[in-house]
Amino acid sequence: MALTLIKEDGSGKANANSYAAAADGDTFHDGHLYAAAWTAATAADKEKALVFATRVVDGMFRFRGFKRVSTQALQWPRSACREPEAGGAWVDEMRVPSAVRDATCELARELLRADRTDAPDGEGLWSLTLEGALKVVFDPAHRRPMVPPLVQALLGRYGDYLGRRGSVVRLVRC
């Protein structure tokens, strides 16, 4: 069955599955120095990557505020979420912030390059030794994050990344 990308337009669609369309990704990557994985992809693969990136964004971030409509499929649009770049004004409830769209496009490109959700090679290994020749020690704390730092920075304005190790959370006073 073919995938049909349904972009969230700010109305709180019950069947939306992406924060960006392939055309949004094309526009975003026009100004990207490392866009080769995106530009080489087929239209169908671009749409699959955007839908997958949206799933990762929604699964790995706890956004402030509340879903605007209880029946909407995605985490955005939201009510009662502050816009830190606008002096603390509220995010427009009838739109998805451009940072969310851009983060989705950036993550989609990264997902086209490699499956960042897959367990890393060597997971569970501490060391590997070839007697008298070589010893490799793996650092379990050093692995590529599922969500790249740029995506974390873009979305960190609106919520908290759940993929960090540790138990520190942001305290927000009302």
Image: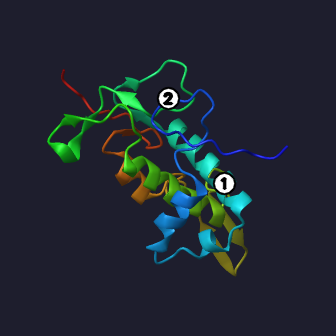
Quarter of the image containing the N terminus?
Answer: top right
Work out which residue is located at the far bottom of the displayed protein and give it: 133
Rendering colour mode: rainbow
The residue that appears at 42% across and 24% down in the rendered structure is 68
The residue lying toward the viewer, choosing from 43 and 55, is 43
User: Can the viewer see residue 84 in this picture?
Assistant: yes
- 10 Å neighbourhood of mark 2: few (<14), some, or many (≥20)? many
Work out which residue is located at the far right of the displayed protein and give it: 1
Disc sitting over residue 22 in the figure: none
User: Can the viewer see residue 120 in this picture?
Assistant: no
> Helix, strand or loop at disc 2?
loop
Q: In the rendered structure, which amino acid carries the disc numbered 2?
A: Gly
Residue 149 point in image, percent of width and height: 41, 58
Q: Quadrant of residue 134?
A: bottom right
Q: Quadrant of residue 120?
A: bottom right
Disc sitting over residue 12 in the figure: 2
Label 2 and label 1: CA atoms lie apart by 20 Å
Q: In the rendered structure, which amino acid carries the disc numbered 1?
A: Glu
